Image (spheres, rainbow, N blue to C red):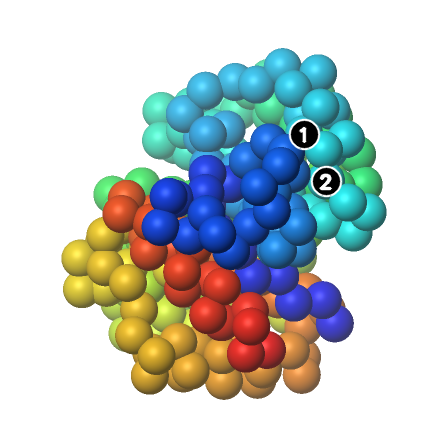
Amino acid sequence: MTLRIGTAGWTIPRQWSDEFPAAGSHLERYASRFPGVEINSSFHRQHRRATYERWAASVPEGFQFAAKLPRAITHDQRLVATDVLLDVFLGEVTGLGTSLGPLIVQLPPSLAFHPEIVDEFFSELRARYAGSVGCEPRHASWFASDAETLLVSHRIARVGADPSCVPGAARAGGWSGLAYYRLHGSPRMYYSAYGPEQLAAIGERLAADARRAEEVWCMFDNTTLGAATGDALWLRERR
């Protein structure tokens, strides 16, 4: 079992700079303390393959990047007719080589579960990519048994997210080989830090998932005021 605790992006906030080496790029300094990171910027814009290759060359052996699929696939096309977009993205992100971890499919809150569309999309993705994939749905229809069954059939993990859109969404589900958490901050998304009691509960949840999953990821996305880095450091130091 591999447990990776980290943040969305590798910018080091000023208030936590003393916790990292003084020398090196932000990524090199970040990778000295954390074993993984989530690339959020791939959701908003393309990166050249050479950029991914440069990032991979900047981190130690065993470090991994999770990468979000572009919003052009998930939000604009809404999972329909995405074959060319998938080819372009995978041609770029696989520049990470062995440092590439899970791909993350974050869906818009308005995107309901449609079995035919979802089955075709994940079939297209799986025809191109055999690695770990996590899906973060944000519509209540994705949390029924038929959606769970379909995700498992394609070896897709369902991301556990906080705040959760429906009861049960805070727990990871879907394919059991990967347990992936995206913690956005609560009560104020992207801003609020998690207190010690909340972090301790998160740690217990990760320990429970570690008994079933080959990979466990916990990425803090409450980055606006730098809380993600502090939360990730607190949790990592106590694992």
Q: Quick one: SS at disc 1? A: helix
Q: CA distance from mark 1 to mark 2?
A: 7 Å
Given residues 231 and 43, the one toward you in this image is 231
Q: Which residue is mark 2?
A: 59
Tag 1 and tag 2, C-beta contact below 8 Å: yes
User: What residue is drawn where x is 57% and y is 41%?
Assistant: 22
**Crowd class of label 1 (few under 14; some 14 to 19; many from 20; radius 10 Å):** some
Given residues 67 and 143, the one toward you in this image is 67
Q: Position of residue 127 (x, y in %)?
A: 73, 36
Q: Position of residue 149 (x, y in %)?
A: 55, 65
Q: Is residue 115 something one can see in this rendering?
A: no
Q: Is residue 48 above or below residue 217?
A: above
Q: Is residue 30 something one can see in this rendering?
A: yes
Is residue 186 toward the left or the right of residue 64 in the image? left
Q: Position of residue 228 (x, y in %)?
A: 38, 55
Q: Is residue 173 above or below residue 82?
A: below
Which numbered disc covers residue 227? none
Q: Amino acid at mark 1?
A: Trp
**Crowd class of label 2 (few under 14; some 14 to 19; many from 20; radius 10 Å):** many
User: What residue is drawn where x is 62% and y is 55%?
Assistant: 33
Q: Amino acid at mark 2?
A: Val
Q: Is residue 11 above or below residue 7?
A: above
User: What residue is drawn where x is 46% and y is 30%?
Assistant: 41
Q: Quick one: SS at disc 2? A: loop
Q: Position of residue 93 (x, y in %)?
A: 66, 28
Work out which quarter of the rendered image holds the C terminus and state it.
Answer: bottom right
Q: Which residue is mark 1?
A: 55
User: What residue is drawn where x is 39% and y is 44%?
Assistant: 13
Work out which quarter of the rendered image holds the N terminus and state it.
Answer: bottom right
